[in-house]
Amino acid sequence: MKTLILIPSRLSATRLPGKPLLKINGLSIISHVVRKAKEADIGEVIVAAEDQEIFDDVQNNGGKAILTSDEHKTGTDRIYEAFEKLKLKDIDLVMNLQGDEPLMNIDDIKNLNNQMIKNKSEFGTLGSIITDKNFHTNKSVVKVKTKQKLFDTSFPEALDFTRDTNEKASNIYHHLGIYCYQTQILKKFVSFKQSYNEKERSLEQIRALDNGIKINVALAKSSPIGVDTEEDFMALKKIMEYKSE
């Protein structure tokens, strides 16, 4: 099966404008993500960019990008436009990788792709073990509840996604913002209007569940830092600069 990795990216993030072009070790966050995606070696990697500046940065750093509309409400809607514009043939799976998580584990990306192929799943994502109890009440950390416990080779269904949980609830994991869809499911997903629950929780994956699309969850080895705030960026910068010394 053939996989395409698409990375949605835009400069107009409300909490940290200009985030994709912030630099760590002389390279923008978005170009770090592109390099990581290429290292996973599961398929072609293309950034679905809202802004010319992102497009130029990615191209100048040896990556591929395509410009998309500035009117999309979610990253999935953006990557579908890119997928349609690219007119690539024989693509079976589209992976949606977040443009603000340059520490995403390559093995986790590969594992999700492998699980999708092995289980012939329609839609998949990742969850990791919650090691910080504060995550349960931290609304910026998205949680996923699964039907069964996650372990290395399991790929159970997601029952729900939420921002607030009880730490004693069973089968609750830290949800990582990476998605993989069969191409026809991606098309189906974007054909639905945003659901009430999706808007209420600001979680696009809820649209799938609300419309009867099953989402399977694979266990991730690590929980990468996503960049939503200046504090997140400084923490990430510190880790990545330390690693490169």
Image: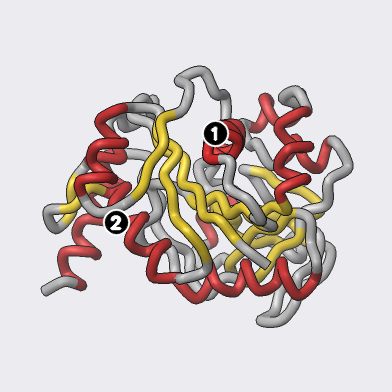
Q: Which corner quadrant of the image does residue 114 belong to?
A: bottom right
Viewport quadrant of the C terminus: bottom left
What is the tally of numbered marks visible in this picture?
2
Mark 1 in CB contact with mark 2 (< 8 angstroms): no
Residue 192 image offset from top left, x and y in percent: 78, 28
CA distance separating discs 1 and 2: 24 Å
Q: Which corner quadrant of the image does residue 180 belong to?
A: bottom right
Choose between 241 and 119: the one closer to the eye: 119
Query: Pointer 1: what residue?
Result: 85
Residue 225 image offset from top left, x and y in percent: 39, 56
Other-residue count near label 2 (Cα within 10 Å), few / some / many at <14 / 14–19 / ≥20: many
Other-residue count near label 1 (Cα within 10 Å), few / some / many at <14 / 14–19 / ≥20: few
Q: Secondary structure at mark 1?
A: helix
Q: Is residue 163 above or below residue 13?
A: below
Q: Secondary structure at mark 2?
A: helix
Choose between 58 and 159: the one closer to the eye: 58
Earlier in the chain: of badge 1 and badge 2, it is: 2
Q: Amino acid at mark 2?
A: His
Query: Pointer 2: what residue?
Result: 32
Residue at image location 45% in from the left, 20% down from the top: 70
